[in-house]
Amino acid sequence: MIPWTPETRTVIFSATKAVGALIIAMCVDRGYVKYEDLIISFWPEFGQNGKENITVDWIMTHKVCF
């Protein structure tokens, strides 16, 4: 068995999507963010090149790509 260290590389593919979705859902539940909030309200620089109307919901439902 190979020992696990802080430098051990792993392949996790899309496993972080579920964690990210849970974090956003918790933030919505606690009132920190709404699904209809514009991303530029948190990250103003994001709103360049036609991306000024993208919402949290659009990102969470994969309606946009980066």
Image (spheres, helix red, strand yellow):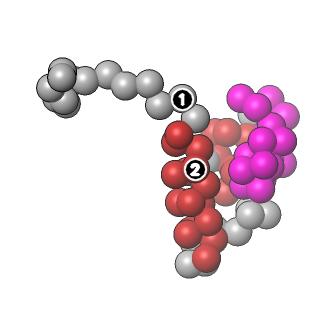
Q: Residue 27 in the image: x percent, y percent?
A: 56, 68
Q: Residue 3 in the image: x percent, y percent?
A: 15, 26
Q: Is residue 32 left or right of residue 5?
A: right
Label 1 crowd (10 A; few <14 / some 14-19 / many >=20): few
Name which residue lies at 73% across and 46% down: 59
Name which residue lies at 58% across and 35% down: 14
Mark closest to the chain's N terminus, 2 or 1: 1
12 above or below 37?
above
Is residue 52 found inside the magenta-colored segment of the image? yes
Say which of 17 and 57 sits in front.
17
Q: Find out whether the residues at labels 2 and 1 contact each other: C-beta distance under 8 Å.
A: no
Say which of 19 and 66 sits in front.
19
Q: Is residue 13 left or right of residue 28?
A: left
33 above or below 66?
below
Magenta segment's dominant SS is loop
- Quadrant in the picture for the N terminus: top left
Identify the amino acid type marked 1.
Phe
Q: What's the mark number on residue 25?
A: none
Q: Is residue 28 left or right of residue 50?
A: left
Tell me the residue that label 1 is attached to. Answer: 13
Q: Is residue 63 left or right of residue 20?
A: right
Label 2 crowd (10 A; few <14 / some 14-19 / many >=20): few
Is residue 55 found inside the magenta-colored segment of the image? yes
Name which residue lies at 71% across and 29% down: 66
Residue 38 in view (yes/no): no
Q: CA distance from mark 2 to mark 1?
A: 11 Å
Say which of 14 and 26 sits in front.
14
Tell me the residue that label 2 is attached to. Answer: 18
Which contiguous range is marked in magenta?
49-66
Identify the amino acid type marked 2.
Ala
SS of the residue at dot 2? Answer: helix
